[in-house]
Image: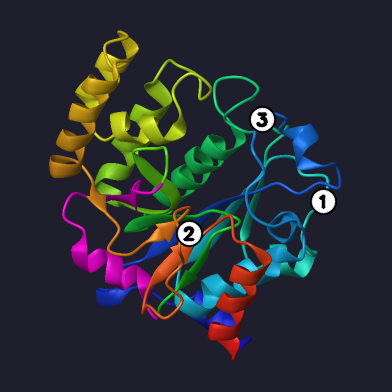
Amino acid sequence: MSRLDEKTTGSSRNDQTYVIGSGWWCSQEPDSRVNPKRGKLGTNKQREVEFFQIWLNNIKNYTSPSSIAVVDSASPIKPDSELRAQTTWIELPFNARHATDHIGQWSGWLRSVLMSGQYALATEADYFVYVEQDCLLKGERIIDRCLEDMRTGLMFGDGEGTPQPLQQSFFLIGRARLGSFLKNLSDIKARDSEISPEWKFVFASWRPFVLCANMGLLTRRKTRARVVRIARRFFFDDLPMGVGRSRPVPFDATYYYFQHGSEEEITQHLEALYG
């Protein structure tokens, strides 16, 4: 067993276990053609198959999951079998595409959350942790650091610096709330192109929000602002670190996470990690 494999079989503080979930999509076809309504963010490097090893090594350097569940949206290009064997690789029969222009009820991203979340629930992990396929983390025992601040059982990224109420490239959910949260997500009638996945997370944090959303009562900006204030106070926590999609990335900080990285940002992160 390699050093990285040994780290993967570890556990969190107090022997609490967690599953890391993620999604996978990679194609030689330009993303502008596959997801024409999605703006280009970050370098093409993070959409190439070689980036998966960078992502996986990053996960294993800073976390100790009981397993890593990756949901593949029928991607035409996949990582090497040796890398996939280090995860629980789950294949979907089609690519539902981006939330701005998707097929069916949910985008490919939200399907990856629902599938890997159910896997965490079925394996009775204490926590479900999601790390998006282009998201890199920094910080020894970063999950433990997050759990120190968790009080509600749901923990998402702060939406400051983004057009959304929260961020979802890195988040944590405790087992006690995971089943109801996934049910709330799936019970929201609107498609992802109608209510963004970020807003769906806000509404799924409390069942009455879901019922109100399904009745069309949560469409006004002022109403949503009040909902976010209530949810952040009572129903979910903010991650104790940034940055996600906001900028700049604080490379000297003890803890951070970021996605949509530029070539320079990814290089700087890897230099900090490996020297």
Determine which quarter of the picture holds residue 229: top left
| Viewer-nearest of discs 2 and 3 | 3
Please provide the residue range marked out in magenta: 140-161
Give the amino acid at mark 1.
Ile
Residue 124 lies in what quarter of the image? bottom left
Question: Which residue lies most toward the right here?
Answer: 28
Q: Which mark is residue 96?
A: 3
Q: Is residue 91 left or right of residue 58?
A: right
The residue mark sitting in front, 2 or 1, is 1
Going by the numbered disc 2, the residue's amino acid type is Ile
Quadrant of residue 241 in the image? bottom left
Q: Residue 267's x, y, as percent? A: 64, 75
Residue at 64 percent of width and 25 percent of height: 102
Q: In which quarter of the image is the N terminus?
A: bottom right
Q: Point out residue 54 in the picture as x, y percentages from the top left corner.
A: 65, 71
Work out whether residue 240 or residue 249 is closer to the camera in this orientation and state it. Answer: 249
Q: Which of marks 2 and 1 is nearer the N terminus?
A: 2
According to the image, label 2 marks what residue? 20
| Residue matched to label 1 | 77
Sequence-wise, the earlier of marks 1 and 3 is 1
Give me the C-alpha separation between circle 2 and circle 1.
22 Å
